[in-house]
Amino acid sequence: MARRCEISGISAMSGNNVSHANNRTRRRFLPNLQTKKVWLADEKRFVTIKATARVFRTIDKKGLKAVLKDYAK
């Protein structure tokens, strides 16, 4: 499974670890992915979504339909 948000599409970034001696080695910045079940009121069922914590906070604020509509652009 890819480490990618199903809604926003955010995936891993790459960068450097920088030591005290200023040595640089490559590293990955992984997104904060969570797997949760979300209730769809229209269809009267739960849907499992793998998304970032930021997207889940936005779903709590706006609702699932509004978030899917925003990210569909």
Image (cartoon, grey):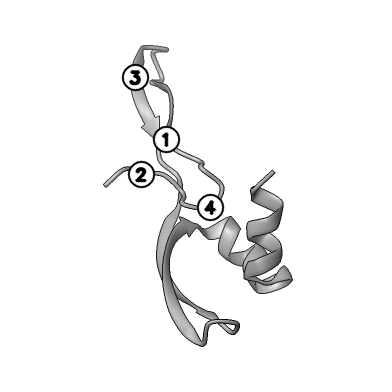
Counting other residues with Cα less than 10 Å from the Cα at mark 2, is it few (<14), some (14-19), or many (20 or more)?
some
- Residue 57 position, x and y percent, is 62, 66
Q: Is residue 17 above or below residue 41?
A: above
Q: Nearer the viewer, residue 56 or 28?
A: 56
Kindly indicate whether the residue at mark 1 contacts the one at mark 2 (C-beta within 8 angstroms).
yes
Kindly indicate whether the residue at mark 3 contacts the one at mark 4 (C-beta within 8 angstroms).
no
Circle 2 residue? 3
Q: Residue at x 40, y 41 (%)?
A: 30
Mark 1 is on which residue type? Ala
Q: Earlier in the sequence, mark 4 or mark 3?
A: 4
Circle 4 residue? 7
Helix, strand or loop at mark 1: loop
**Distance between the Cα atoms at labels 2 and 3?**
18 Å
Mark 3 is on which residue type? Arg
Mark 2 is on which residue type? Arg
Helix, strand or loop at mark 3: strand
**Distance between the Cα atoms at labels 1 and 4?**
15 Å
Mark 1 or mark 4, whichever is nearer to me = 4
Circle 1 residue? 12
Mark 4 is on which residue type? Ile
The quarter holding residue 24 reads top left
Q: Residue at x 34, y 19 (%)?
A: 26
Helix, strand or loop at mark 4: loop
Residue 52 numbered mark, or none: none
- Identity of the residue furthest to the front in this view: 43
The quarter holding residue 35 reads bottom left
Circle 3 residue? 26
Q: Earlier in the sequence, mark 2 or mark 3?
A: 2
Q: Earlier in the sequence, mark 2 or mark 1?
A: 2
Query: In which quadrant is the C terminus drawn?
Result: top right
